[in-house]
């Protein structure tokens, strides 16, 4: 079967007379069939997302910082390229181990990893 995974993005903006609406979708064919959905406590030290090890070839990652105050850094193989402020979220393609690091205090992070 093809195109088992459908990804979507929606953005709406309106302020000061300017307005923008944008929506994009993509369909992706998967080889694997694994998925992980967890909430994990992330300390102020380099921490691998636990369930990521169960995913053979990570394809896409959705991650949300559930903390109301502190930020969390997220990245691949220990290189932190995404900074999620309190309550922020991101989705990105992944290749390799996925790590997170809380800034000031331990934070809860929700994540979904989908195998390709």
Image (cartoon, grey):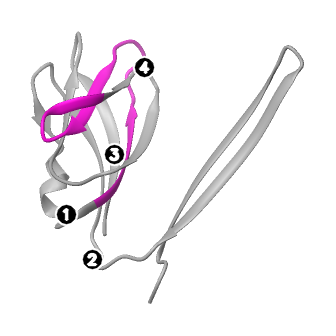
What is the spatial separation of the Cα atoms under label 1 and label 3, in whole angstroms? 13 Å
Instruction: Identify the disc placed on residue 111.
Output: 3
Tell me which residue sits at (42%, 77%) in the image: 29
Rendered residue at 37%/22% (across/down)? 67
Q: Residue furthest bottom?
A: 1
101 is within the stretch colored magenta: no
The disc, 1 or 2, on the residue closer to the chain's N-terminal end is: 2
- Residue at point 27%, 70% (across, down): 34
Q: CA distance from mark 3 to mark 2?
A: 18 Å
The quadrant in which residue 45 appears is top left
Count of labels in the image: 4
* 67 on left or right of 21: left
> Which residue is the site of mark 4?
86
Q: Which residue is mark 1?
A: 55
Which residue matches tag 2? 32
Region rendered in magenta: 59-81
Q: Are marks 3 and 2 in contact (CB under 8 Å)?
A: no
């Amino acid at each position: 079967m093809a195109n088992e995974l459908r990804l979507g993005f929606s953005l709406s903006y309106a302020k000061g007379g300017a307005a923008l609406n944008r929506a994009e979708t993509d369909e992706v064919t998967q080889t694997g069939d694994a998925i992980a959905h967890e909430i994990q406590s992330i300390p102020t030290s380099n921490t691998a997302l636990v369930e990521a090890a169960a995913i053979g070839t990570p394809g896409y990652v959705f991650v949300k910082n559930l903390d109301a105050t502190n930020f969390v850094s997220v990245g691949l193989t220990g290189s932190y390229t995404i900074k999620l402020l309190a309550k922020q979220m991101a989705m990105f393609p992944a290749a390799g181990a996925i790590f997170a690091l809380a800034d000031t205090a331990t934070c809860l992070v929700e994540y979904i990893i989908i195998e390709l």
